[in-house]
């Protein structure tokens, strides 16, 4: 270094440094997966599937349509689920999980066997469960269960749990009629969903609940009458 000579100091404008850092960060985000985003995106795709099936009234929807409704690409949807069938199964599992939570919450408040049956009825027809897109999804999942082993397995789990909960309550009221009452009420619950999906039922949960409670009380009264 030449004595007495000081090299120039190159100052970088702070705004330039900020822009460069932001650009580098954005580029890195594009290369790296967003940590913690997978559960959020999976949930968004499941909800989009339910809404898309409800809007179209059938399972004749594409992954592209589901992904578009969820605000992401088809490639990302395939990345998370692999196939349309797996998205349908995930949506079905989500609906059954929500329903199970509704039932468990209602049963906690029930004190008697009769109240347990009523709790199951009311949990089956909450506004969240009986909204149009959810009803349509239920009906179409019955169709899906005819051709998908996993969907059929989930449907059987739902049916077994529903009947088990009903039978557990009914056998404490009338052991002799417990099986008959269980089959009858389970069939009526599913039947009201089918009527609603086909546009032949009421549009609100209240009337459906009233029908089932009337059936329940009439059936219990008849079971007490001597033959």
Image (tube, rainbow, N blue to C red):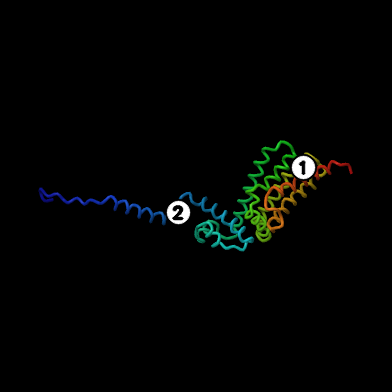
Residue lying farthest to the top in this orientation:
111
In the picture, measured across the screen, residue 157 lies left or right of residue 74, that is right
Residue 81 is at least partly visible in this image:
yes
Residue lying farthest to the left in this orientation:
3
Per the image, label 1 sits on a secondary structure element best described as helix
Of residues 157 and 200, the one nearer the viewer is 200
- Image quadrant holding the C terminus, namely top right
Reading the chain from its start, which is encountered first: label 2 or label 1?
Answer: 2
Q: Mark 2 points at which residue?
A: 33
In the picture, measured across the screen, residue 43 lies left or right of residue 200, that is left
- Looking at the picture, how far across and down is residue 92, in whole percent? 62, 54
In the picture, measured across the screen, residue 104 lies left or right of residue 70, that is right
Of residues 188 and 155, the one nearer the viewer is 188
In the picture, measured across the screen, residue 12 lies left or right of residue 99, that is left
**Is the residue under label 1 in contact with that under label 2 (CB below 8 Å)?**
no
Residue 150 is at least partly visible in this image:
no
The mark lying in front, picked from 2 and 1, is 1
Q: Mark 1 points at which residue?
A: 170
Of residues 156 and 64, the one nearer the viewer is 64
Per the image, label 2 sits on a secondary structure element best described as loop
Q: Residue at 70% of width from left, 38% of height from top?
A: 110
Of residues 226 and 158, the one nearer the viewer is 226
The local crowd at label 1, few if under 14, some if 14 to 19, many if 20 or more residues have their Cα within 10 Å, is many
- Looking at the picture, how far across and down is residue 202, in whole percent? 70, 53
- Looking at the picture, how far across and down is residue 25, in whole percent? 37, 53
What's the mark number on residue 30? none
């Amino acid at each position: 270094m030449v004595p007495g000579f000081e090299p120039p100091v190159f100052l970088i404008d702070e705004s330039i440094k900020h822009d460069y850092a932001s650009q580098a960060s954005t580029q890195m985000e594009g290369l790296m997966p967003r940590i913690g985003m997978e559960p959020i995106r999976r949930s968004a795709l499941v909800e989009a599937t339910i809404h898309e099936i409800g809007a179209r009234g059938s399972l004749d929807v594409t992954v592209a349509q589901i992904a578009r409704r969820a605000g992401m690409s088809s490639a990302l949807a395939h990345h998370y689920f692999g196939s349309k069938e797996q998205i349908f199964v995930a949506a079905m599992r989500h609906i059954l999980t929500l329903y199970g939570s509704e039932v468990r919450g209602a049963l906690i408040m029930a004190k008697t066997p009769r109240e347990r049956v009523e709790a199951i009825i009311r949990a089956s027809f909450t506004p969240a469960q009986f909204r149009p897109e959810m009803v349509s999804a239920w009906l179409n999942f019955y169709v899906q269960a005819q051709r998908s082993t996993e969907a059929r397995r989930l449907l059987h789990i739902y049916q077994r749990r529903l009947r088990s909960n009903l039978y557990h309550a009914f056998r404490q009221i009338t052991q002799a009629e417990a099986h008959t009452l269980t089959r009858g009420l389970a069939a009526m619950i599913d039947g009201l969903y089918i009527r609603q999906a086909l546009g032949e039922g009421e549009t609100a949960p209240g009337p459906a609940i009233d029908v089932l409670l009337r059936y329940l009380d009439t059936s219990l009264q008849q079971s007490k009458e001597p033959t």
